[in-house]
Image (tube, grey):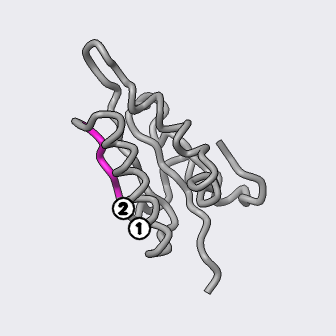
């Protein structure tokens, strides 16, 4: 996902995994509601701290409810209150879809 206004250089650096990650959130072991709450808090903290690039690890999932958090994450990031913070979302490694990197809009100082 790439929002309008993102320059090609930043997009290439992000999509190739070359952009420095300011913080990571690991959602392994959480139920869906807890994972959403952790993500929401993390994104709010990212806004306050003016982080540029964050990584969210969902894992691939296993067992009967395999990958629920991984499947829900794109929907959560499309919510109006979170979407307004996001410039782009990519899988940092094409072979591993267990995490995503999110390029955030920064606040003007």
* Residue at 48 percent of width and 49 percent of height: 101
Check disc 1 and report the residue beneath it: 45
Asked which quadrant contains residue 24, the reply is bottom left
Asked which quadrant contains residue 49, the reply is bottom left
User: In front of the other: label 1 or label 2?
Assistant: 1
Asked which quadrant contains residue 44, the reply is bottom left
- Tell me the quarter of the image containing the C terminus: bottom right
Q: Where residue 6 appears, x then y in whole percent?
A: 72, 58
Residue 7 included in the magenta stretch of the image: no
Residues tagged 1 and 2 counted as in contact (Cβ below 8 A): yes
Q: Where residue 52 appears, x then y in whole percent?
A: 52, 66
Residue furthest to the top in view is 64
Give the mark, 1 or 2, whose residue is nearer the N terminus.
2
The answer for how far apart the CA atoms under marks 1 and 2 are is: 10 Å
* Residue at 52 percent of width and 42 percent of height: 76
Indicate whether 59 appears above or below 4.
above
Q: Secondary structure at mark 1?
A: helix
Check disc 2 and report the residue beneath it: 23
- Tell me the quarter of the image containing the N terminus: top right
Q: Where residue 65 appears, x then y in whole percent?
A: 32, 18
Residue furthest to the front in view is 33
Badge 2 crowding class, 10 Å Cα cut-off, few under 14, some 14 to 19, many 20 or more, is: few
Q: Depth check: give the residue in front, 19 or 70.
A: 70
Residue furthest to the right in view is 4
Q: Secondary structure at mark 2?
A: strand
Q: Depth check: give the residue in front, 70 or 9.
A: 70
- The residues colored magenta run 24-28
């Amino acid at each position: 996902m790439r929002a309008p206004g993102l320059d090609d250089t930043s997009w290439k650096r992000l999509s190739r995994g070359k952009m420095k990650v300011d913080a990571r959130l690991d959602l392994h072991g959480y139920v869906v509601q807890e994972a959403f709450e952790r993500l929401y808090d993390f994104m709010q903290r990212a806004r306050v701290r003016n982080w540029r690039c964050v990584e969210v690890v969902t894992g691939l999932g296993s067992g009967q409810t395999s990958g629920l958090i991984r499947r829900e994450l794109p929907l959560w990031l499309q919510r109006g209150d979170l979407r307004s913070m996001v410039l782009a979302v990519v899988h940092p490694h094409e072979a591993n879809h267990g995490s995503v990197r999110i390029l955030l809009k920064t606040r003007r100082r």
